[in-house]
Amino acid sequence: MAVPSDIFAPSRLFRSTAFRLTLLYMGVFAIFATAALGYVAWNARRLIEDQIRQTIDAEITGLSEQFRQGGIRRLVLAIEQRARGPGASLYLVTSPFGERLAGNVEQVPVGLLDRAGESEIPYARSAEEGQGTRPAFAIVRVYVLPAGFRVLVGRDASERDRLRAVVRRAGGWALGVVLLLGVIGGFVIARRVLKRVDAMSATTLSIMASDLKDRLPVSGNGDELDRLAINLNTMLDRIALLLGGLRQVSDNIAHDLKTPLTRLRNRADEALRPSASEADMRRALEGVTEDADNLIRVFNALLMIARLEAGQARETMAPFDATATTASVAELYEAVAEEAGVHLACQIEPGITAIGSRELIGQALSNMLDNALKYGRPPAEGPFEVTLSLRQTGQGVAFTVADRGPGIPPEQRARALERFGRLDASRSQPGFGLGLSLVNAIAHIHGGTLELTDHAPGLAVVLTIRAQPSGIGHAG
Ligand SMILES: Nc1ncnc2c1ncn2[C@@H]1O[C@H](COP(=O)(O)OP(=O)(O)OP(=O)(O)O)[C@@H](O)[C@H]1O
Ligand SMILES: [Mg+2]
């Protein structure tokens, strides 16, 4: 019994598209070939018949001329003479009453001589005996002479019939061969295609079983199945990437939110202690509110990153005054910095217009300043200084926040950009590790870049986005 996946099972081959297409093609080809052959044969036949008719016409003209000159006697003589020649035509002359006077035709169908005109008749020739009587056909014409004598002149049409037989035989063979080739070709092609399609569908099963790790085979000849396999593989890569990201994010969320939630729960527990005074309860509840606020902030940041990565903010891109935006963020942070004993130095180039979202860039700058204030304290004694600068770099606008703190070693910079990516050195500071991933997402949606570089010593964070090309006015 044939298992369903047996690619050699005839029922599957017959049902395959490749096989049906090949057969269809062969069928159409056979129809056109037959039509072409038929047309050629028909033309050849007409040509032969025309020639026969012309010969008959010429004979009749000659014979009536004889009759006109010498009457029936001369006509009979002429016919007897002509009938003896090699390859002679067929002749018969009868009296007005139907008596045979001369000619080489033994028998004619009854009533043929009654009407003038052309017809096709079977005949037996009286001259050529001894070869057996094969039925032959002739094209004949009956002509009535003025005195009522009838003359029949005809020519053998076997040449035409032979041609017809040859064409018919050749056509039959050709058709048979074409159909046979069609079936064989269909089998071969369908088997090849089916083999590859089966390999592909077997692989899809193993891809599903292997957690999207396997890939479809690509034969390398660049045909449509290859293109399909390549596209499906690209799609699988992308799906695997997205799934990986999703898995990582959900892992991170589960892992990183457990601590604050546990703390929140412990605070609530504390408030419920029987010995807790009203002041204790109040303090505990305040802590709960603060923790809940932090969690809300985390979720907001996660949502915003997700939205930015999905590209939903792209339509808000417009020219904006980067100088004014940077200056207002600086103004906002000056007070915070002063309170923390940090000197905030600003180097803001005037009149710079960038393309993007003013709100998102403001958010990115405050995340960058936040980090500098949190992690930028110099390890040794010395002034705590943070620099905020804005400058145009050719086609781009670079926003830089630099500090003189411990910096981030190059191999850990990628980790700092990840969601919930926090370095061990900074565990003592509050935070969830979302600030820089948000800045990174903002850079991406602007088609820009975010670089963490060495400020020797310290860290310089550079956010670069597109500048408004000069000569075009900006919208504030
Ligand atoms: N200026 C800096 N100097 C040294 N390390 C830094 C600096 N900025 C960031 N980092 C490191 O990169 C990590 C990721 O920064 P990010 O801003 O993403 O998170 P966070 O500041 O820890 O938390 P959040 O910004 O969500 O409150 C930080 O935890 C810190 O270890
Ligand atoms: Mg931060």
Image (cartoon, grey):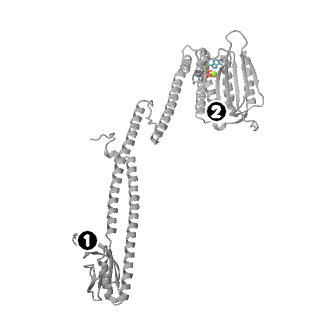
In the picture, the quarter occupied by the C terminus is top right
Q: Label 2, label 1: how many angstroms apart (C-alpha)?
A: 93 Å
For disc 2, the marked residue is 447
Q: Is residue 472 above or below residue 81?
A: above
Q: Is residue 94 above or below residue 250?
A: below
Q: Residue at x 52, y 31 (%)?
A: 242
Distance from mark 2 CB to nearest ligand 1 atom below 8 Å: no
Q: Is residue 119 above or below residue 389?
A: below
Residue lying at the far right in this picture: please name it: 350
In the picture, the quarter occupied by the N terminus is top left
> Quarter of the image holding residue 346?
top right
Circle nearer the N terminus (2, 1): 1
Callout 2: few (<14), some (14-19), or many (20+) C-alpha neighbours within 10 Å? some
Callout 1: few (<14), some (14-19), or many (20+) C-alpha neighbours within 10 Å? few
For the residues bearing labels 2 and 1, Cβ distance under 8 angstroms: no
Residue 310 in picture, x, y percent from top left = 58, 34
Disc 2 element: loop
Q: Residue 369 versus residue 414: which sits nearer the camera?
A: 414
**Can you see residue 432?**
no
Residue 297 in picture, x, y percent from top left = 61, 26
Q: Residue 444 versus residue 156: which sits nearer the camera?
A: 156
**Can you see residue 360?**
yes
Q: Amino acid at mark 2?
A: Gly
Tell which tag, 2 or 1, sits nearer the viewer: 1
For disc 1, the marked residue is 135
Q: Amino acid at mark 1?
A: Pro
Q: Quadrant of ligand 1?
A: top right
Distance from mark 1 CB to nearest ligand 1 atom below 8 Å: no
Disc 1 element: loop
